[in-house]
């Protein structure tokens, strides 16, 4: 299953500056494993303790995978996977 | 340096005042590659909190697609601090993940006088930058005595 992954600026150090890269897998977890094989170090930026990092949003065809099974969410041939860091913060310390 | 139109400053401050004591948040979008904020976009704070803000993830992807389709990008991410100064908190710094954007903070702790400051936040490092408020972008990069070019 080949998919296209859109990579945010902050992770492009892992993709040689590429905004968009190819990967394969039938779940989000498999796509991330494949990304890691091709672009070493990227997995640690996305996954923490076996689930998606709290402040990283991953979308499959613009659906937030958090509401579709998380790392287990299904991915199909030709899907678009988009990684967008959360925009969040606040005054709490 | 962030050069920004006064009406956009006013819109951000009005939003921050309106949502006080909750933190308000949003985006100023501009033409891709211009570094020039032109369009005010209010975002919902999905945390509805006095001490935390987060863009709704669905609104975030919708905005991302909208900007892409219009050849725009986010130039500024703004949010308010309602009881503390307009300086990035540890939380702000830890989460900030857009090195290409200006992070504008507005403090509404004083009911009469707001504080507005702008930063770059890159790899956990905060750099404050000057904010130049202009009435229009037309002459903002030329001297005050410049006249428009005659075709």
Image (tube, coloured by chain):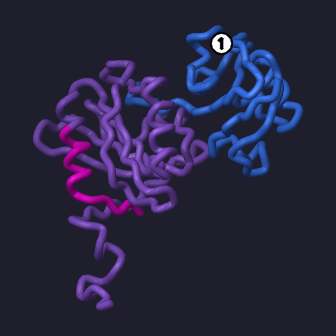
Chain colours: A blue, B purple
A4 with respect to B127 (left or right): right
- Judge whether A12 appears above or below B18 on screen: below
Query: Seen in the image, is B133 located left or right of residue B2?
Result: left
Q: Position of residue B9 (x, y in %)?
A: 25, 51
- Relative image position of residue B23 (x, y in whole percent): 30, 28
In terms of image quadrants, where is residue A65? top right
Tell me what residue is drawn at x 31 percent, y 36 percent: B42
Percent x, y for residue A50?
74, 13
Q: SS at mark 1?
A: helix
Q: Residue at the far bottom: name it.
A: B150
Of residue A8 and residue B49, the one placed in the foreground of this image is A8
**What residue appears at the point 76 percent right and 30 percent down from the top-left corner?**
A3
Q: Would you say residue B48 sits in the magenta stretch?
A: no
The residue at 31%/40% (across/down) is B85
Residue B86 in percent (x, y) is at 33, 42
Q: Nearer the viewer, residue B7 or A78?
A: A78
Quadrant occupied by the C terminus of chain A: top left
- Prevailing SS of the magenta stretch: helix
- The residue wearing badge 1 is A70
Horizontal arrangement in the rendering, residue B144 relative to residue A6 (left or right) = left
Q: Residue furthest left?
A: B112
Q: Residue furthest front?
A: A78
Quadrant for the N terminus of chain A in the image: top right
Magenta segment range? B1-14
């Amino acid at each position: 299953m080949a998919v296209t992954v859109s990579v945010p600026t902050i992770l492009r150090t892992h993709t040689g500056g590429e905004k968009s890269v190819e990967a394969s897998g039938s779940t989000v977890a498999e796509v991330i494993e494949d990304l890691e094989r091709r672009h070493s170090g990227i997995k640690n930026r996305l996954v923490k303790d076996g689930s998606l990092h709290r402040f990283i949003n991953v979308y499959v065809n613009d659906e937030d995978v958090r509401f579709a099974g998380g790392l287990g969410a299904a991915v199909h041939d030709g899907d678009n996977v988009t990684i967008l860091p959360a925009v969040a913060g606040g005054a709490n310390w | 340096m962030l050069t920004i139109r006064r009406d956009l400053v006013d819109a951000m401050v009005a939003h921050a005042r309106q949502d006080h004591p909750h933190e308000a948040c949003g985006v100023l979008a501009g033409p891709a590659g211009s570094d020039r904020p032109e369009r005010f976009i209010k975002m919902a704070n999905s945390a509805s909190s006095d001490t935390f803000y987060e863009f709704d993830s669905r609104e975030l992807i919708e905005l991302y697609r909208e900007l892409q389709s219009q050849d725009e990008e986010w130039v500024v991410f703004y949010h308010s601090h309602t009881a503390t100064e307009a300086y990035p908190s540890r939380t702000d710094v830890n989460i900030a993940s857009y090195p290409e954007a200006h992070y504008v903070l507005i403090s509404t702790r004083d009911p009469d006088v707001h504080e507005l400051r702008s930063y770059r936040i890159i790899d956990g490092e905060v750099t404050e930058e000057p904010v130049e408020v202009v009435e229009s972008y037309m002459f903002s990069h030329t001297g005050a005595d410049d006249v428009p070019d005659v075709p």
